[in-house]
Amino acid sequence: MRELTQLAIDTAVSNGASYADIRIIESKTENISTKNGDINYLNKSSILGYGIRVIVNGSWGFASSPYVTKNEIRRTAIKAVNIAKASATLRKSGIILANEPVHQDLWTSPYLINPFKISVEEKLNLLYKIDKILRKDEKIKSAVCLMSFWNEHQWLANSEGTFIEQDLLRSGTGYTATAVEGSEVQVRSYPSSHGGQFKQMGYELILSTPLVENAERVREEAIALLSAPDCPNGKKDVIIGSDQLALQIHESIGHPSELDRVIGMEANYAGTSFITTDLYKNFHYASPIVNVVADATVPTGLATFGYDDDGVRAQRYHIIQNGLYKHYLTNRELAHIVGDERSRACNRADGYNNIPMIRMINMSLMPRQGSLDELINDTKDGIYIETNKSWSIDQKRLNFQFTTEIGWEIKNGKKVRIIKNPTYQGITPEFWQSCDAICGKDEWILWGVPNCGKGQPGQTAEISHGAAPSRFRKVTVGISK
């Protein structure tokens, strides 16, 4: 691969590029799902291709191809240069790349069992076993179980002398039971909704997750929700389970921290950000107990890597420290806008045929102390909620509403009854400033988000968010009628 990457760099530079890089990517996936005792889908795929990115006359050019041959690499590099030259005719300012040391490295994500070497029959037998338990009651009208595996082998080289090889492996699994009675429909999922749990692990993730052991509970909770009362309306203390809190972090801290959103480059697809640059490092985002850390080095994270697609080494740093906002997510191109001398290693692309852009890395709410039971015992009037059902957040990531699959009303330190359709809403800084308790490390879980969308054309990225159950005071819950 070194010969091919050097050919791309040399061709781009000899045709006028002041900077060039190439990413060659070989990836394979396997997705398996059952529904009500039958195969829902079973697909395998593999992709090989490369993308070449150049700077000419202060503007970017990008081109890609699935044909990994010398002639095609030359053609693609020249195409990228020509695109950059055309872009330069309309540019308003030149590109400034933050400095980064030259790297020569190999990085591989650790795993114990290669999932691609486990037979499809073994995987299906486990899914069928779960399905059988979920559908023991006729009120369960739909049972969907899935497994997902992904491997990506990357080679990155640039004109500064960097050459990096990385090999990433991810696994995921989960299931959903849908209960129906008359016009009432309720859903319960495990380990979480939107596909389940995903980690940078091998098949050991499947074997270590108590999938069969939780199937009966999930079925019975789905059925119980059919006759449960609705979430009460009003102001309540809300304890949010770690899986729902992961999505709260993603939507109301992660996305507004992406610097391209802050400066308006991402406005059309999913909005901008309320954390404008005048608030940088001086904004009370949350209560003093809140510490949120971005970390591309945490074990098993979906956005754990050795280097991003700029060739910048993975890092760990505070986004929020003791309630104060500290850092944006940046790449080499935009770091200088906020006075940073180095990128924070957040430039990533979806596959070989998309240009990299700022994406979240793993972002987690740091644990403090105590258990969930102790937190419930300390709550007089509130609700405990878990597992996301739906969400909505405005274009600046400021006003939001979330609905979860299940909740429990809390009275005088006890869970007294299940409630359905628990819904809460708020304004991002007011919500995080109301956080007065975060459980300890024994309750902390790193949750994978495999399908974050951004960009035009749209790209998908994978991120993880760690959280422990946490309490927020006087939150608006329910839906006014």
Image (cartoon, rainbow, N blue to C red):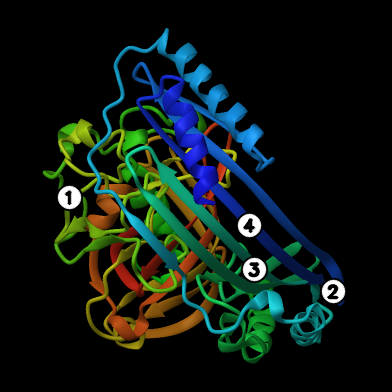
Identified at 66% across, 68% down, the residue is 148
Residue at point 63%, 57% (across, down): 27
Amino acid type, label 4: Ser
Circle 3 residue: 149
* Contact flag, marks 1 and 2 (Cβ < 8 Å): no
Label 2 environment density (alpha carbons within 10 Å; few <14, some 14–19, many ≥20): some
Residue 225 rendering spot, x and y as whole percentages: 64, 74
Answer whether labels 3 and 2 touch (C-beta < 8 Å). no
- Mark 3 burial class by Cα count in 10 Å: few <14, some 14-19, many 20+: many
Q: Residue furthest top?
A: 89
Task: Compare marks 1 and 2 and give the one earlier in the sequence.
Answer: 2
Q: Which residue lies furthest to the right in this view?
A: 38
| Residue 49 relative to residue 296: left or right | right
Q: Is mark 1 on a helix, strand or loop?
A: loop
Which residue has dot 1 on it?
A: 326
* Residue at the spot of label 2: 36
Horizontal and vertical percent position of residue 21: 44, 38
User: Upstream in the sequence, badge 1 or badge 3?
Assistant: 3
